[in-house]
Amino acid sequence: MTDTPKPAWNKGKVVGKKPPLTPDQVSLIRLLLRQDRDLRGLALFNVALDTCFRGSDLVRLRVADVATPAGLREIVEIRQKKTETRHAKPVQARLSGVTRDSLRAYLEADARPLHGWLFTGQGVRWSHSHLSESQLWRLFKGWLERAHLDPALYGLHSLRRTFPTYIHQQTGNLRAAQLLLGHASIESTKEYIGTEQAKALDLARKYHL
C-alpha cells in the first residue's frame, strides 16, 4: 500500500525574494492613501520606505524616535532588534520632507506623548498597543490591492528593499545601500538587493545565443 503524496508546502505560492516596489508603484500607493485621507497609512508607508527598517523595528518606533518637543527629526536612529546583540552601532535613517509632512499631519490629528508608540492600532482597544507585524502586513496587503498589485508577489521585505535598491540602481553605490539596511557585510547587501542577479540579467539582455 502506497502513501498518498502530501502536497508541496509551496504549492500555489510565490516563493523566493519579494521584489521592491517601483517608483511608479510608490507614487500610486501614496496617491491612493491621500485620496483615502489615511493619515496613519500615509505616514507609516513613508516612514517604512525612508528608514528601510525591518517590520519588527518599524512597528516598535516611538514618537520620540521621530519627534522632539521642538518638532520632527530629520535623522532617526535605532538599534535593530534582530542584530542588537551582535552590533552595538545603531542604524540611522533620514526622513524626507514628504515623510515629515505626512508625520506632522498624522501626529497633529492624534496627539501622542513622546514616550508613546508611533503606530498603534485603531479604536480604544488597540490605541495603547503598537502594531504587530501581522497587522503591518495586512495594511500593506490592503495598499497593494488598492493599487491592483498582486499581494502574493510582495512581502514586508519589499518595503525594506525599495529605497536601497533604487539608490543602488541610480548611483551604483552599494556601500550606501549597506548603510541604509544596517548590514554588517557588503556581501549580505549584494544578496539582499540582488545586485549580482541584476547584473546577470543585464548581460543576458545584451548577449544571446
Image (cartoon, grey):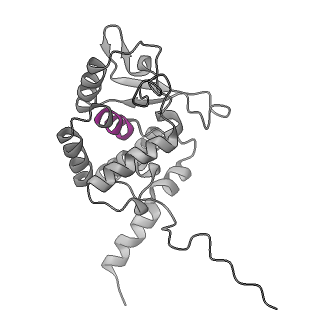
The residue closer to the viewer here, 157 or 209, is 157
Q: Find the residue positioned furthest to the right.
A: 1
In the picture shown, does residue 204 fall above or below 141? Answer: below
Membership of 48 in magenta stretch:
yes
- Residue at 34% x, 19% y: name it: 73
- Residue at 39% x, 59% y: name it: 151
- Residue at 32% x, 49% y: name it: 143
Range of the magenta residues? 42-50
For this view, does 206 lie left or right of residue 132?
Answer: left
The residue closer to the viewer here, 74 or 40, is 40
Badge count: 0
Q: Position of residue 5 (x, y in %)?
A: 70, 82
In the picture shown, does residue 208 fall above or below 152? Answer: below
Question: Is there any visible trace of residue 105 in the rendered image?
Answer: yes
Image quarter hosting the N terminus: bottom right
Image quarter hosting the C terminus: bottom left
For this view, does 130 lie left or right of residue 89?
Answer: left
Q: Position of residue 178 (x, y in %)?
A: 47, 43
The residue closer to the viewer here, 43 or 172, is 43
Question: Is there any visible trace of residue 172 in the rendered image?
Answer: no
Q: Position of residue 197 (x, y in %)?
A: 45, 66
Instruction: Kindly report the secondary structure that dominates the magenta region of the rendered protein.
Output: helix
The residue closer to the viewer here, 161 or 119, is 119
For this view, does 39 lie left or right of residue 160?
Answer: left
Q: Position of residue 89 (x, y in %)?
A: 57, 28
Membership of 165 in magenta stretch:
no
Q: Find the residue positioned furthest to the top.
A: 69
- Residue at 38% x, 21% y: name it: 66
In the picture shown, does residue 106 fall above or below 196? Answer: above
